[in-house]
């Protein structure tokens, strides 16, 4: 949830993010279209990626790129750099949306896979609510850069948790064998 909160904050308040960087609603639309196109490409390429590394690896990679995108969004001084930041989208959300399904299916026993997918969907839904409410409050209280700083921290903490949880699940699977 912590990783996805940063995604929700950036997507829900993208207009407030682009305006201080010299952007308009047109720039916002272009950035969102670019990000969407790039994430779809990652989704189509995912089966080929799993021949190289397993879904758990790509799930962890996505956490790192969510954090990088949040950090680079915070640091982007203008719209040109903000457009370049969208290049992180396929390795963040593009990978997470597909790798989470594969990863949960690999972790869960067959009879629990639907429950695992439901937990994942629930986590993303709760993160969207928290990001929406918290992001608006943070903009009002700390400004856009304050909100983006919180997004970076949230994503980084989530990525650390995913890395640690993956290591524990790997040792648990080894012990089960």
Image (tube, helix red, strand yellow):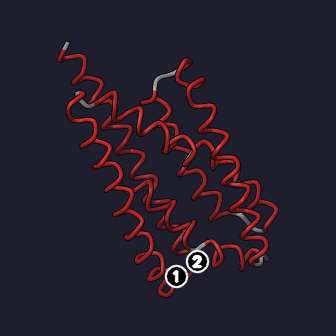
The residue sitting at the left extreme is: 176
Residue 70 location (% of width, % of height): 57, 58
| Residue at mark 2 to residue at mark 1: CA–CA distance | 5 Å
Instruction: Indicate which disc, 2 or 1, sits on the residue closer to the N terminus.
Output: 1
Residue 105 location (% of width, % of height): 34, 31
User: Which residue is pictured at 70% across the width and 50% down the height?
Assistant: 37
User: Which residue is pictured at 49% across the width and 39% down the height?
Assistant: 98
Residue for badge 2: 144
Relative to 48, does residue 71 appear above or below in the rendering? below
Relative to 24, does residue 157 appear above or below in the rendering? above
**Left or right of residue 36: residue 116:** left
**Left or right of residue 130: residue 83:** right
Image quadrant where one finds the N terminus: bottom left
Image quadrant where one finds the C terminus: top left
Circles 2, 1 touching at the beta carbon (< 8 Å): yes
What label does residue 139 carry, if any?
A: 1
Label 2 environment density (alpha carbons within 10 Å; few <14, some 14–19, many ≥20): many
- Res 86 → quadrant: bottom right
- Of residues 76 and 134, the one nearer the viewer is 134
Relative to 81, does residue 63 appear above or below in the rendering? above
Under tag 1, what secondary structure? Answer: helix
Residue 49 location (% of width, % of height): 58, 25
User: Which residue is pictured at 46% across the width and 23% down the height?
Assistant: 54
């Amino acid at each position: 949830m912590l990783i996805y909160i940063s995604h929700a904050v950036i997507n829900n308040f993208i207009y407030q993010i682009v305006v201080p960087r010299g952007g308009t609603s047109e720039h916002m639309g272009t950035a969102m279209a670019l990000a969407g196109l790039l994430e779809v490409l990652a989704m189509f390429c995912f089966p080929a990626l799993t021949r190289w590394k397993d879904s758990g690896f790509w799930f962890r990679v996505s956490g790192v790129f969510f954090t990088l995108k949040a950090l680079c969004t915070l640091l982007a001084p203008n719209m040109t750099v903000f457009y370049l930041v969208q290049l992180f989208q396929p390795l963040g959300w593009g990978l997470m949306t597909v790798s989470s399904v594969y990863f949960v299916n690999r972790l869960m026993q067959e009879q629990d896979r639907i429950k695992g997918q439901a937990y994942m969907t629930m986590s993303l839904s709760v993160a969207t609510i928290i990001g929406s409410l918290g992001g608006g409050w943070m903009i009002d209280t700390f400004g856009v850069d304050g909100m983006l700083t919180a997004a970076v921290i949230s994503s980084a903490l989530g990525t650390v948790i995913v890395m640690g949880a993956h290591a524990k699940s790997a040792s648990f699977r080894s012990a089960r064998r």
